[in-house]
Image (tube, grey):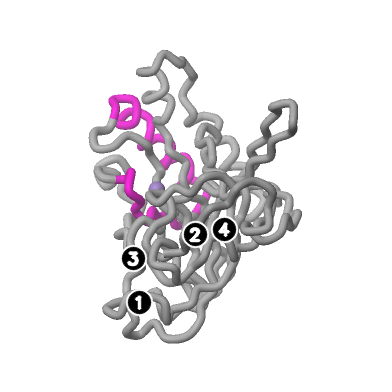
Amino acid sequence: MGFPALSLSAENERVLVVADLHLGMEGELAERGISLPSQIPSARRRLEEVVGREEPDRLIFLGDVKHSVPASTWREWAELPPFFEALLRRVKRVEVVKGNHDGDIEGMVPRGVRVHGAGGIRIGEAGLLHGHTWPSGELWRAEVLVCAHSHPAVEFRDPLGGRVVAPVWLRGRLDTSLLPPERRKGAEGHRRVIVLPAFGELVGGYAVNGPSSEELLGPLFRCGAARMEEMEAFLLDGTYLGRVGELPGKPNYSGG
Ligand SMILES: [Mn+2]
């Protein structure tokens, strides 16, 4: 649908999932001398457009709603509650699965918003987690793990120095026999994995066909159970680009 948002139906509900808004990122950029207006009005407008189109019963933020760690800026404290309140008027259930940037999010969301731990939640055949931590045991009962955190994108350069970075979806398989032994219990067999692109417009995106970033990969990729070079990449409009390992550039993954 052109937006970095995932729609799924489970348990008679329509669920919309978005990730990595990194609201408040403009505060960090301001400290570096780059002055940008608050990202919240435009994030809200884009979200309301997707919500209007999909009419979900549940809206799930799959981590990194906000940006500043460890402390939050005054702007986040002032702007986040009304942001969530506007969404609660449109969607019955609004939930957050915590990411690595969501330290004090509980105190910033209005009462109607449910906050889940980083281990994730299972909805039907989907296990949803941000991806900077291991999934909770419950998530292995799902067939597909849906995560975020790595802000996947592709980068294309031309010989004149032009450079295009476009966010991508990643889809692939996860071989649980490659999990560390202490993580294998209850997780036998293969699972599918989907990585959501970041919803935030200031989130640059991490080029999957560029130099690898250990930190952004998360444990499922670092242990080799999911392999970045084997993932299939799709542009936001659904265009299939191929496997990450076959993209132009210098993909360089040790695979665990
Ligand atoms: Mn993250």
Residue annotated with mark 2: 58
Residue shown at 33% from the left, 43% from the top: 101
- Judged left or right of residue 72, residue 240 is right
Near-viewer residue (92 or 137)? 137
Q: Is residue 179 magenta?
A: no
Q: Secondary structure at mark 1?
A: helix
**Quadrant location of the C terminus?**
bottom left
**Picture disc at residue 56:** 4
Q: Amino acid at mark 4?
A: Pro
Q: How many marks?
A: 4
Marks 4 and 3, how far apart in space? 27 Å
Marks 3 and 1, how far apart in space? 11 Å
- Judged left or right of residue 251, residue 178 is left
Q: Secondary structure at mark 3?
A: loop
Magenta stretch bounds = 73-102
Q: Amino acid at mark 1?
A: Glu
Residue annotated with mark 1: 138
